Image: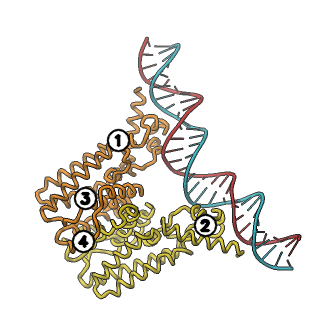
Chain colours: A orange, B yellow, C red, D cyan
Amino acid sequence: MRADAQRNAEKLRTAAAELFQERGLTVPLKEIARRAGVSHGTLYNLFGTREALIDEVVANLAADRLDETAEHALALQDAWEGFAYYVTRVCELQATGPAVADVVSGRYPASECLMLICTRVHGAATQIIQRAQLAGAVRPDFTVEDLLLFFGTNTLLARATTDTAPQAWRRQVLYLLDGLSTKAAQEPLPVAPLTQHQMYDALGKLAGMQ
Amino acid sequence: MRADAQRNAEKLRTAAAELFQERGLTVPLKEIARRAGVSHGTLYNLFGTREALIDEVVANLAADRLDETAEHALALQDAWEGFAYYVTRVCELQATGPAVADVVSGRYPASECLMLICTRVHGAATQIIQRAQLAGAVRPDFTVEDLLLFFGTNTLLARATTDTAPQAWRRQVLYLLDGLSTKAAQEPLPVAPLTQHQMYDALGKLAGMQ
DNA sequence: ACTCTTCTTGACCTCGTGGTCAACTTGCTC
DNA sequence: GAGCAAGTTGACCACGAGGTCAAGAAGAGT
């Protein structure tokens, strides 16, 4: 690889990271090229597809923070505290960076890196929920699919309110948390839980609503 | 108005009603014309704007059902029952017809008819919430803005799950309801409620995410 | 049946996406 | 510094959205 190509790739990575953060993974590629100060032809030449660019950029953008959040949640003694922290913090990450949101939503299944992160999130969430359920803190009918779907809608809400009421999503999170405590559960849910496949299908479509 | 123009207008109204129901108020106008079997030029000639078409079509589509729902909710003796019924039923209407969803979301403020319906929904929801709060059934920090925002995200969720898990939205509604009962409220919300303006701004953006 | 007004049509325009490629420029090696 | 491979550019294509309008078709009145 020639030196100028390497420089351009770096400029594109930087611009992509910024724009992914600001506006989500669906930001037009030409705009990334524009911000990087190169032609969009160069972007296609160096990366080929949006997925490739995502793969190179998004790991540092989201994966670390999501992993940290899960670790911290499990480190908390109280299972409910851990659960509440995890839900709130993930929603907070989504609210502050649309990129994280798109990552959690599992959009762009063509991106291996993203799928990997998504699977990790799924696993961590499962663990955190189960711990809280075993401790009798979270209602037993709540599933990880429910949580990931909530993350999906939380993203959209956060994005819609970011300008005028940037904390609005917190209210919805707090209502949900109060509804998930075993104390609150009025009766078992009469609606079947979603399968993983149903959830991923829905998340993909939700994410399509940028 | 010439006879053929009248016929065409009728065909367009019918097609619009169908497509609005199936796919929401943002369906491409050219597709409406296609289904009606006329040129899109005719549509523009007869109605001019999407809003005009909405005005002529949507009232019967959504307003009646929303009004009925509110009436029925207030007719129920138990304030909590009424509240739960209202929330569930509006979400159900949204799930079964994207048109209702867009109406509740207050999209297209240019449409007088829509704004009117939206205001009526706002009023009815306020009444139903207040009654339940006065009865001590619903937590006092819950606001009508919270509910309408929830409706906004519920639409998107319902639309995303309609193919593979058409009842999925019910689970989220039930969690919310359990979280809204005074029994569940763990502590007052530490986040300020939204103003009406903030909510309408957010709803507009949420609706933009078809 | 003829005319005149109204209405319809579909080609065309702008915009904003994703994506390609021939012609040009530039870095690297000898 | 000359030549060549590597990289860059921006015009160009397709597509689908909203929207316009001159030309032609078709009601309606006489």
Q: Is residue A1 above or below residue A64?
A: above
* Residue C16 rendering spot, x and y as whole percentages: 52, 51
Which quarter of the rendering shows the C terminus of chain A?
Answer: bottom left
Is any part of residue A163 visible from this angle? no
Tag in front: 3 or 1: 3
Separation of disc 2 and disc 1 at Cα? 45 Å
* Quadrant occupied by the N terminus of chain A: top left
Q: Position of residue A162 (x, y in %)?
A: 36, 60
Q: Chain of mark 3?
A: A
Q: Chain of mark 2?
A: B
Q: Residue at x 46, y 34 (%)?
A: A45
Is the C-beta separation of discs 1 and 4 under 8 Å? no
Q: According to the image, label 3 marks what residue?
A: A144
Protein chain holding label 4 = B
Question: What kind of element bears circle 2?
Answer: helix
**Residue at 22 percent of width and 55 percent of height:** A125
Which residue is label 1 attached to?
A55
Residue indicated by mark 4 = B179
Residue density around tag 2, few if under 14, some if 14–19, many if 20 or more, within 10 Å: many
Q: In the image, what residue type sits under mark 2?
A: Ala
Give a yes or no on whether discs 3 and 1 share a subunit: yes
Residue B191 in the image: x percent, y percent? 27, 67
Is A75 left, or right, of A114 in this rendering? left
Q: Can residue B54 be seen at all in this image of the molecule? A: yes
Kindly identify the amino acid type of the residue bearing the numbered disc 4. Answer: Gly
Q: Nearer the viewer, residue A202 or B180?
A: A202
Q: Does dot 4 land on a helix, a strand or a loop?
A: helix
